[in-house]
Image (cartoon, rainbow, N blue to C red):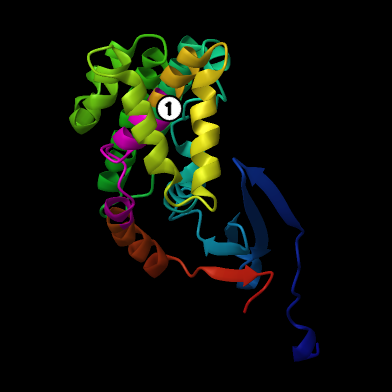
Amino acid sequence: MNPANSSVVRCLPFVAVLVTGLVIALAVGLAPGNSASAAQKTLSWNDDACTYRISFDPAKHDAKRLNNTIRLLFNSEDLSAPIMPYTSGPQEAAKIDLRKFDQECSAAVKKVRELELAPLQGLEDYRGHLIAESEDACRFGNIQIRGLRDPSALREYTRASACFHFIDALEGKSDMMKAYREMVDRQCVDNISPRRCREDGLKEAEKPDGQARVRFRLTTYGWNNCANAHTVRDGDVREKLRAGPEKQFRRTFTVRKKCENPG
């Protein structure tokens, strides 16, 4: 027998499976001598411009845990708590379903809390921070929705005590129109046309439902913009906590990147 023909290489098919928004590819082959089987899997994920891919040994790493870990480290936006629905005026605000918002919030927090993750050092600290941000965002949204109907509810968000002067105006403890004019002036300073901006803002108060519009804008643009600066959300802290687990992830797995516009 010709030595060159003493062994035969067999190739088996390639299978791709979609798992929770990520692609797991499974390539199966036979070890030399057909004595054992070996499997190689890949996971891929995307951002706005690039596709990323890792290969892993399923005997050493659980695909589901890796999937969840990638979502948490690189695509956590889809795990974030919902924000209060956008409304353009007081009539729309009155139709917001508070119960639905609270249910969506609870589901989002529960999803992050129950994710089964890969054992990366520091990953639980990062998860904990994301949960804290989501819980705070849920509380903030709940309070704001109720505050559109009852301004006193806004006082429950004590982290933003520096913004209570807006609540005083909404409750009639100070001059509401004075607070509104001052808010409009601050908002229009950097506008391309400050004068037109101020005129448009003040015209809101002259409409038939002007008082309701003033109260709505003092809540959504006055209190909300002020209170947002006092929430738990902190991009610098979040990124610092994420950096450690990501570094370990990249040491463990070779991440290959392909971008539409590499430059």
- Residue 45, percent from left and from top: 58, 55
10 on left or right of 85:
right
Q: Quadrant of the N terminus?
A: bottom right
- Nearer the observer, 176 or 86: 176
Where does the image place residue 206, in percent across and percent down from the top left? 53, 19
Lateral position of residue 49 relative to residue 160, left or right: right
Residue 134 seen in render:
no
* Main SS class of the magenta portion in the image: helix
- Residue, x 41% and y 18% (percent of image)? 215
Quadrant of residue 153 within the rendered picture: top left
Q: Is residue 13 left or right of residue 186?
A: right
**Residue drawn at x 41%, y 67% as measured from the top left:** 250
| Magenta span of residues | 219-239
Q: Where, by quadrant of the figure, is residue 110 drawn? A: top left
* Residue closer to the observer: 252 or 229: 229
Q: Residue at x 45, y 25 (%)?
A: 217
* Kind of residue sitting beneath label 1: Thr
Please give the residue where the numbered disc 1 appears in the rendered image: 220
Residue 33 position (above or below residue 84): below
- Label 1: few (<14), some or many (≥20) within 10 Å? many
Residue at 28% across / 39% down in the picture?
128
- Queried whether the magenta region covers residue 209, the answer comes back as no
Q: How many marks?
A: 1
98 or 212: which is nearer to us? 212
Instruction: Pinpoint residue 249: horizontal percent, then vertical percent.
Output: 39, 61
**Any part of residue 214 in sight:** yes
Which element carries disc 1, helix, strand or loop? helix
